Amino acid sequence: MKNIAILLGILIMSIAAQSQQSPSTSLGNLKKMKKTDTGLLIETSFGKAQIIVYNTDIIRIRIVKNDFEPDFSYAVIANPEKTNFKIIETEEVITLTTDSVKLVISTNPVRFKFLTGDNRVINEDDTFGTNWVGEEVTTYKKLQDGEKFTGLGEKTGNLNRRGEAHTNWNTDNPAYQVDDDDLYSTFPFYIGIHHNLSYGIFMDNTYKSIFNFGASNDRFSSFGADGGEMNYYFIYGNIRQIINQYTLLTGRINIPPIWSLGFQQCRWSYFPDTEVLSIARTFREKKIPLDVIYLDIHYMDAYKIFTWNPERFSKPTEMLGKLKNMNVHTTVIVDPGIKVEKGYKAWEEGVKQNYFIKYPDGKDYTAQVWPGWCNFPDFTKPVVRKWWGDNFAPMVKDGVEGFWTDMNEIASWGGGYTPSLVQLDWDGHITSYRKAKNVYGMQMSRSTYEGTRNLMNGKRPLTLTRASYAGAQRYTAIWTGDNVATDAHMMLGCRLVNSLGISGMAFAGVDVGGFMGETSAKLFGRWITVGAFTPFFRVHKASNENSSEPWTYGESVENISRNYISLRYRLMPYLYSAFAEAHKTGMPVNRTLVIDNTSDEKCWDIPYQQQFMFGPSMMVAPVESTKEITKVYLPKGRWFDFFNGKQYAGEQEIMIECPLDKLPVFAKGGSIIPMQTIIQSTSEKPSDTLFIHVYYGTESSVYNYYEDDGTTYSYENGTFLKSKMSFQPSEKKIVIEPLSSGSYISKFKTIDVILHGFENVADKLKVNGKSATQKSTSIDLYNSIKPSDPLWFDSRKMEQKVLVIDNLNAGGKTEISW
Ligand code: MIG
């Protein structure tokens, strides 16, 4: 009897213990498993998991507490490919093996471990695996020895994010600090590196998310979100392959209109029309190349979207025509807030047709921004996207070609605290703002891109966004919001652009000169030189700050600006080819050095972490405006000072002079850089010679030259030109394919080949087997103005000796041998 009482007591106690809820719960023990066409379905004692093989190197894992939601993503456009894999089960583990990765799933409890074919651990769950605290879901991974982390797009911090944690919650953060965490965009994708292995993880969950790379702990890295499913893609490969696969999942950039790769001048705000025209004219008079001018919020009537201010811009079509005649394209800003005003068409339509985001009681959500009280279109609703896009018709007709989506975090007065309970359509699966906030900006730029592309008769629009989410590269370029006029911000900007690049956003830039704060002449001078090597190259300045056109900082900075902007235009064939590569493979235009030098510790070092490859052949070492001499790290290979031809061996740190007019820029030995003559805008024709610069090196290389009409989408139907140019030192030859293959004929009729660092070949040179006429000469890629240029003196000489073989027929194959 006594025993029974005790037993009963124990039983009651244990029931009580069980019903006392643990504050956190992890995925449980295996109960059921089912093989599917693409992987596995698993049921556990607590929660479910689905494993989907996308291809040999990508495995997706979905984990839920209860049931899976309908599978829907704004980021991912790829479907699982037919892939060979096999599944083997034992009591303790299930093993799923593709041709390159092994996923070992322990069953008690269910935890995941990714291995190489030869059983080296790439990535494995910590004991907690995937865990819930309330609705918050987090996956914990064991920190590997010496593991490094990089990625997350627009995030401050170091190139190696080990020891950092970051939150994704799109935030309007004007004049942010160089270490602030909350910025405008969310790219929940990172790369982990250890023991010469690397992998990518993309967590496609739009709720507020946190990535922890060993911050405040010594055992795990983790990624998690405030709600929704654990839904991540594991990608195996080297960094290049990971970027390629990540952009296979989330898409790649379209080739932008070539004019958007030219120089862009912006201000909050240029008005009235006469001021806009006078700015454009000054660029032309001063022979500083320019392609785009921006109209910030003051072009509108009372900040009402889709309107022109009747006083400031009384004849927009006429003004746009005049700008067009000057070869200047116009971009206008558009904010999501639609002014609440009886009789205002956009607002009336939006209200009537239920296009605005709403409270649960059906009332439109209203908040204040520039126009006063506003409602906000629901860009997650297909009919709203269409409506928004169609609304650009009059502007497109007026001649506007660029569309700049701002304030789309959503920003509003009062700190942007849009309530969580506000509802959005989510393409037919109504959801809360908690889930939709991080994609709102992306969907706004999508609506803008799809609409204007549709309206522009086959011409490419430029779209630029501030807020963003993974996959936005399919619709838009991005800039890093309201930075500050300091050297630290200029350096941060380089890291941000590099980081955005590995997160799919190849078309990225910052406000050159610094948006907030007074810009010193020196800072502007340096920043313009760095900006010339940024995919998206735009000067911008806040209202109530100093003027910030290149000529407002004195004569020497004006000269520096002219020279570097001109250089950018000379490099246009090279830059454009780099964008074509980004479109095709996802490889960014600006490439952090660790992409190709992953195991070189120096490339991760804090002093060198800003350095990047600008396309495949050039390296840029950004440096503060206060420095006249700096340390640069040269990775493996051989390097030529781009301006004076001085050669350096790789794998060393060097000290190099960097007066304001000489940014440390290098050409890679063995590489090829095509250039053209200076033009004042991309609408202007350069001379019909393509200048192919070849830099001597010991390793062979292939350069992919690309050209198309620059402004239409006919490249999507195959109207473009590709030419392989190769440098083969062991066979002692350079081979250039004709610039006339395919359905597009190059604008260049002849080519000049410029040989850098080719020693003792002059009397052996042959072109297509016949001895070549060549000349030894000096070239100046910087366009130094001598000797009147006050910054020019002999020790900074920007000239170099080269061998030139000129006037070759671009339509035929060219083989240069020695
Ligand atoms: O509340 O349109 O980041 O580039 O000039 C500020 C005015 C709104 C923020 C953007 C900035 C733009 C400014 N905008």
Image (cartoon, rainbow, N blue to C red):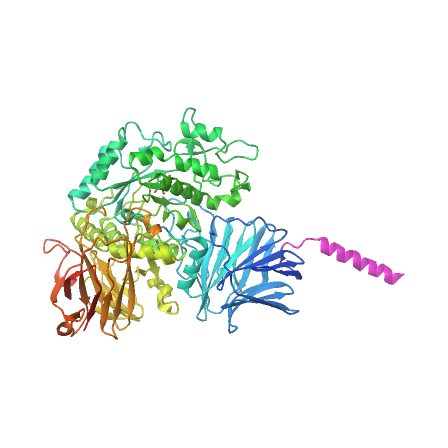
Per the image, is 241 magenta?
no
Identity of the residue drawn at 58% across and 49% down: 69
Q: Image quadrant of residue 49? A: bottom right
Q: Residue furthest right?
A: 1
Q: Residue furthest top?
A: 343
Confirm whether the magenta stretch covers residue 9. yes
Magenta region, residue range: 1-23
Please state which of residues 348 and 136 is positioned toward the viewer in this rendering: 348
Q: Is residue 345 left or right of residue 646?
A: right
Q: Position of residue 342 (x, y in %)?
A: 43, 24
- The image position of residue 775, as x and y in percent, is 11, 66
**497 above or below 409?**
below
Q: Residue 579: where, in percent of width, then height?
A: 32, 54
**Numbered circles on residues, count:** 0
Residue most extreme to the left: 787
The quarter of the displayed image where residue 600 is located: bottom left
Query: Is residue 214 found left or right of 778 in the rendered image?
Result: right
- The picture quadrant where one finds residue 33 is bottom right
Residue 786 appears left or right of 548: left
Task: Label the magenta part by its dominant secondary structure.
Answer: helix
Give coordinates of residue 402: x percent, y percent: 32, 41
Q: Nearer the viewer, residue 81 or 619?
A: 81
Q: Which sits in the foreground, 238 or 511?
A: 238
Describe residue 599's horizontal placement relative to residue 265 as left or right.
right
765 in relation to 23, above or below: below
Q: Can residue 290 be seen from the camera position used here? A: yes
Quadrant location, the C terminus: bottom left
Does any portion of residue 495 appear in the rendered image? Answer: no
Q: Quarter of the image containing the N terminus?
A: bottom right
Looking at the picture, tell me which residue is in the foreground, 743 or 31. 743
* View quadrant of ligand 1: top left
